[in-house]
Amino acid sequence: MKNQKVALITGITGQDGSYLAELLLEKGYIVHGIKRRSSLFNTDRIDHLYQDPHDPDQRLKLHYGDLTDSMNLTRIIQEAQPDEIYNLGAMSHVAVSFDTPEYVGNVDGLGTLRILEAVRILGLEKKTRIYQASTSELYGGMPENKNERGFYDENSPFYPRSPYGVAKIYGFWITKNYREAYDMYACNGILFNHESPRRGETFVTRKITRAVAKIALGLQEKVFLGNLEAKRDWGHAKDYVRMMWMILQAGKAEDWVIATGVTTTVRDFVRMAFGEVGIELEFKGEGVDEKAFVTACNHKDYQIEIGKEVLSVDPSYFRPTEVDLLIGDPTKAKEKLGWVPEHDLSSLVKDMMQGDVALMKKDVDLLKAGHEILKQAE
Ligand code: NDP
Ligand code: GDR
């Protein structure tokens, strides 16, 4: 097909990369993706999109690569000649960034520079539009930096609170600088937390939905979490990747906040997730002593003892510096780009719980058939 658009996605094997690849393939794009070499398969989220490289109509093409390798990135961009690059690759776990600060700076910060500079070196700066995966972590949750309506928006000051946030702030500014210095179509999407059944297992929402499914099915006794007071503005990843694409079609390169405008505590997310399997909870105690107990179980498929302790706080999940509260103002994206999210928090929790109950039921079937299931560290 002539005039077929070409996109390159870094981080295609991640949550957002997989949904974005689906969306772009549906729109008729040729999609190139960068995957890392790993000792085990790491393409689970995109295996359903796999196309045989011998197929003459192959539209999904995967390349081995890494955001720390400039030559590799330059070669892939030269081969793909993309109209659009979505730089989603990152070490994206805030807590882990305190353990690997130099690596995060290299991948999340300098990795962004490598993409921008490769495009410039190859003379593609007038052809290739670039989306940079910026984040609400840039704001750091500083209360004094909210706008007069009580939200973070495109004009709110930044104050990152983790090596991840600090690395991403470099990515934000270098993207803006290349836009201004070289007139490149390079945009930041400042995305607030977005989740899905494909969310990485160690982010708090997915850790909760997996644990709740296991507890309801009798596969796990309880879940240990960190800061239950933290508040996040949680949306659905499917809605957010649609916005990434819209940002690159906007006609003018700008930076955009994508959020729901609603914030919820981790504790209330826990309540909602248990609610999906008919289990009601009571939280008792404060701080490190807080625990949750079952007060009712109203679902015919699950039997759980009333009074059972299903949650404890484990301070090892506390972060050296925490982002206490995030809430974003997506007015600009809604008004200028006509973005309308299809999900709210309830439908997100439902979607994630359905996914994890289905997944964990497979473990129940394996156990019934006499097989062992692997215990995984959470
Ligand atoms: P994931 O952690 O699910 O995916 C990250 C992707 O980056 C994976 O494909 C991973 O590969 C890849 N990656 C990691 N390190 C490297 C590297 N050194 N070189 C190349 N690729 C690498 O993240 P999400 O999909 O949730 O997020 C996508 C982007 O959006 C990230 O940049 C994240 O920081 C940012 N973001 C996410 C938000 C969210 O709430 N989800 C909110 C705001 C911003 P592998 O599969 O091999 O690990
Ligand atoms: P976040 O997501 O740090 O906001 O970054 P995460 O789900 O890891 O934490 C959200 C909040 O929950 C608290 N929390 C816990 N977090 C984890 N992971 N595990 C726990 O057991 C736990 N208990 C409580 C955290 O302290 C925090 O306050 C995500 C990532 O996707 C980033 O890449 C992205 O940039 C931001 O969202 C926006």
Image: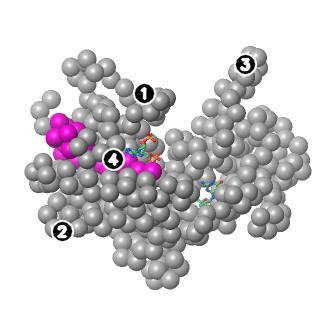
Instruction: Name the residue carrying label 2.
Output: 180
Q: Is residue 344 left or right of residue 63?
A: right
Quarter of the figure that contains the N terminus: top left
Q: Earlier in the sequence, mark 3 or mark 1?
A: 1
The magenta stretch spans which residues? 73-91
Q: Of discs 2 and 1, which sits in the foreground?
A: 2
- Describe the element under mark 4 as helix, strand or loop: loop
Q: Earlier in the sequence, mark 1 or mark 4?
A: 1
Q: CA distance from mark 2 to mark 3?
A: 59 Å
- Can see residue 132? no
Instruction: Name the residue carrying label 1.
Output: 48
| Image marks 3 and 1: residues in contact by CB distance under 8 Å | no
Quarter of the figure that contains the C terminus: top right
Q: Residue at x 61, y 63 (%)?
A: 319
Specify whether residue 82 is painted magenta.
yes
Q: CA distance from mark 4 to mark 2?
A: 23 Å
Q: CA distance from mark 3 to mark 1?
A: 27 Å
| Image marks 1 and 4: residues in contact by CB distance under 8 Å | no
Instruction: Name the residue carrying label 4.
Output: 67
Q: Residue at x 43, y 66 (%)?
A: 166
Q: Earlier in the sequence, mark 4 or mark 2?
A: 4
Q: Of discs 1 and 4, which sits in the foreground?
A: 4
Q: Is residue 121 left or right of residue 253?
A: left
Q: CA distance from mark 1 to mark 4?
A: 25 Å
Where residue 296 sits in the image (x, y, percent)?
A: 84, 49
